Amino acid sequence: FVRGIFNAADPGKDGTQVKVVDLLDRAATQADRNAETAPETAAALHETLGSTYQGLGLLRKAGPHYARSLERRRTALGENDPDTLLSMVNLANTLRAEQKFDEATAMSLTAWEGLKRARGENHRDTLIALALRAQIEQERGRLAEAEALFRDVARLGEAIPADDDQAPMWYSS
């Protein structure tokens, strides 16, 4: 699949300055065409497309891929699988960026609760979901709630050594 996307860059048609976003757009149109693709593989592909679009600052293009990844992971892995819950966090973050705060809040809360059960409250992924909840509250103007959540993130994160693989990036040295 990936080889096909990069081979599709045709300097005769596109010139020598092919944009990454153009390759991503081509990949996005082909991502669901192969019906034989395993749901977990399709989910990982959509997650990668979403995170790449997000990294380029194209959240409106990222959201649909995160939604497809979540849908496929729910089907293949179940609602409470950590990978499904991480897809939920990513989609909630794009909803936050689009100021769809009610949806983002509900989804981030569900993801945080699930990750807390699956991985524990001190796990990196759980803390990321909790930090997202805090960020949503901050952007909603609910500063007291946001502060309390950010304090929880800091308190829980302190229990993880900075050199631990599970330490959130903001605790790593």
Image (spheres, rainbow, N blue to C red):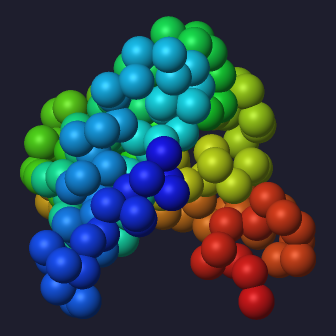
x, y percent for residue 138: 26, 61
Tell me if residue 89 can be seen. no
**The C terminus lies in quadrant:** bottom right
Q: Nearer the viewer, residue 34 or 146?
A: 34
Q: Outermost residue, front direction?
A: 12
| Residue at image location 79% in from the left, 59% down from the top | 166
Residue 27 versus residue 155 in the image, above or below = above
x, y percent for residue 119: 76, 35
x, y percent for residue 155: 68, 63
Q: Nearer the viewer, residue 106 or 30?
A: 30
Q: Give left or right: position of 26 versus 31.
A: left
| Residue at image location 57% in from the left, 31% down from the top | 41
Residue 66 versus residue 48 in the image, above or below = above
Residue 36 versus residue 136 in the image, above or below = above
Tell me if residue 35 can be seen. yes
Q: Nearer the viewer, residue 39 or 132?
A: 39
Query: How many dots with numbers?
Result: 0
Q: Nearer the viewer, residue 20 or 159?
A: 20
Q: Give left or right: position of 59 versus 147.
A: left
x, y percent for residue 101: 17, 43
| Residue at image location 43% in from the left, 53% down from the top | 4
| Residue at image location 35% in from the left, 37% down from the top | 31
